[in-house]
Image (cartoon, grey):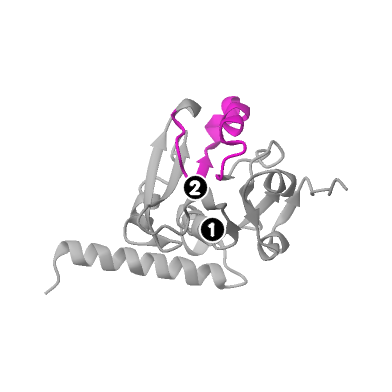
Amino acid sequence: MKTALEMKSINRKITLAIAFLLLLLPNFSRAHTSEAVIKAAFLERFTRFIEWPEEAEIDDTTKPFIITVIGENPFGPILSEFYSSSKIRNKEVEIRYISKPGEISDCHLLFISGDEEDSLVNTLNIVSGKPVLTVSDTEGFAEQGVHINLYIADEKVRFEINETAIRNSSINVSSHLLSAAKIVKPYKDKQ
């Protein structure tokens, strides 16, 4: 007989596995599962195609992969549940929730909520030049410098990438991820 804790862990793993499998289906729509679960899974999927500089210590599995959410938490408990028993890049995942740009500290991925529009420029300035992937789900944020923005089209979660912002940061993105995205502000090589 399994304990309640063991059952909870199994349920989380099943939810994670289903979300990842559903993301692989070509006609997957948000009607099949909650939008928050899909977006939480996308965060991990993005990390597979990002290369952080050595200073980010992404290969040091003794230190956690840190996801920080600034502003209103659009995930509810999903994000914490999703990553409580899962890893990103073979690292334990630590989720931090903050309310002001001044609270941003070392993290690998910064999710910027839509209610942060007034402080978006300040937030992006704080992480500028740091090995931090910025992600949002708010219309217009990619155009303003957020690296990856999630959006809904045809009842499916899709994503756009600000190629110029990525190329001007200290992280690198795989051409595979770029080819799967809608490109906002294409990078023009300055030669």
Q: Is residue 136 visible?
A: no
- Where is residue 26? Give x, y as percent: 62, 72
**Image: 181 above or below 77:** below
User: In the rendered image, which quarter is residue 83 located in?
Assistant: bottom left
Q: Report, in whole angstroms, how far the alpha carbon at label 1 lies from the one at label 2.
A: 9 Å
Amino acid at the residue labelled 2: His
Residue 47 numbered mark, or none: 1
Q: For numbered disc 1, what is the local secondary structure?
A: helix
Task: Point out which mark residue 16 bears.
Answer: none
Image location of residue 41, percent across then percent down: 48, 59
Left-right relation of 154 to 37: right
Q: Nearer the viewer, residue 142 or 166?
A: 166
Q: Residue furthest right?
A: 191
Residue 9 in which image quadrant:
bottom left
Q: Secondary structure at mark 2?
A: loop
Residue 77 inside the magenta-drawn segment: no
Q: Which of the two discs, 1 and 2, labels the residue nearer the N terminus?
A: 1
Is there any visible trace of residue 47 in the rendered image? Answer: yes
Instruction: State the quadrant of the N terminus.
Output: bottom left
Please give the residue where the numbered disc 2 appears in the rendered image. Answer: 108
Of 127 and 45, nearer the camera is 127
Give, as a single range, the part of the protein colored magenta.
Answer: 103-132
Q: Residue at x 38, y 46 (%)?
A: 95
Residue located 35% across and 56% down the image: 62
Q: Position of residue 70 (x, y in %)?
A: 47, 35
Q: Give the residue displayed 44% in from the left and 29% down from the top.
A: 103
Instruction: Specify the amino acid type for callout 1.
Output: Thr
Label 1–label 2 contact, CB within 8 A? yes
| Apparent side of residue 162 relative to residue 114 in the rendered image (left or right) | right
Q: Is residue 86 above or below residue 107?
A: below
Q: Horizontal and vertical percent for residue 182?
A: 73, 55
Front-lying residue, 35 or 176: 176
